Image: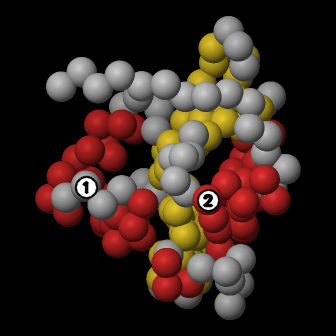
Amino acid sequence: MSTPRIVILESDAEIAESYAVMTQLRPHLSRPDFVPRIRRQMTQGYRLAALYDGDSVKAVAGFRMLENLYAGVHMYVDDLVADENSRSQGYGGALFDWLVRYARKNACAQLHLDSGVQRFAAHRFYLEKRMQIVSHHFSLELT
């Protein structure tokens, strides 16, 4: 691993570069709708960060800064994925640690994320990062 760099993606070209890694976590996303969808979410506070090693995207995170009654000001991580071809090389951990630093720098009291119940490897990773399982997330399909 050369020295990785983490950047918040701004341009359409940068956002498009993250598609191949993001769809490993979100396979339902289509390439034609990816950038427009990210752009719509950005109007709601969504940010997309990528870890590059050389010119390759090795990990991607989508996140927001939120405030609510139960957690105050906090970072919510919508998406966090390391390239499946580069797992166990520290990329996901480096991006997670960057998210923690970014949240602290932006006066967040907490960092939150949800993880599918079937994602056991991700759960081990989050527990190793000292995250706690603090709630159950419920959803209701409306369509």
Task: Give the residue type at disc 1.
Answer: Leu
Task: Point out the tag, 1 or 2, that comes first from the N-terminus.
Answer: 1
Which residue is painted at 72% across and 54% down in the image? 126
Check disc 1 and report its element: helix, strand or loop. Answer: loop
- Where does residue 35 sit, x and y in percent of width and height? 26, 53
Q: Amino acid at mark 2?
A: Phe
**Furthest-bottom residue in this view:** 1
Horizontal and vertical percent position of residue 132: 79, 40
Q: Nearer the viewer, mark 1 or mark 2?
A: 2
Residue 101 at least partly seen? no
At mark 2, the secondary structure is: helix
Q: Residues within 10 Å of mark 2 (few under 14, many from 20)?
A: few
Q: In the image, is residue 2 above or below residue 114?
A: below
Answer with the quarter of the image where residue 10 lies: bottom left
Mark 1 neighbour density, 10 Å: few (under 14) some (14–19) many (20 or more): some
Q: Identify the colour scheme used.
A: secondary structure
Determine whether 120 is above or below 92 in the image.
Answer: above
Left or right: residue 31 versus residue 88 is: left
Q: Mark on residue 53?
A: none
Picture layout, residue 11 above or below residue 56: above
Q: Give the percent coordinates (x, y) of residue 40.
A: 29, 37
Name the residue tied to disc 2: 120
- Mark number displayed over residue 29: 1
Which quadrant is home to the C terminus?
top left
* Pick the front one: 123 or 2: 123
Work out how far the residue at label 1 is from the one at label 2, CA to CA, in angstroms: 23 Å
Rendered residue at 72%/66% (across/down): 93
Question: In front here: 35 or 141?
Answer: 141
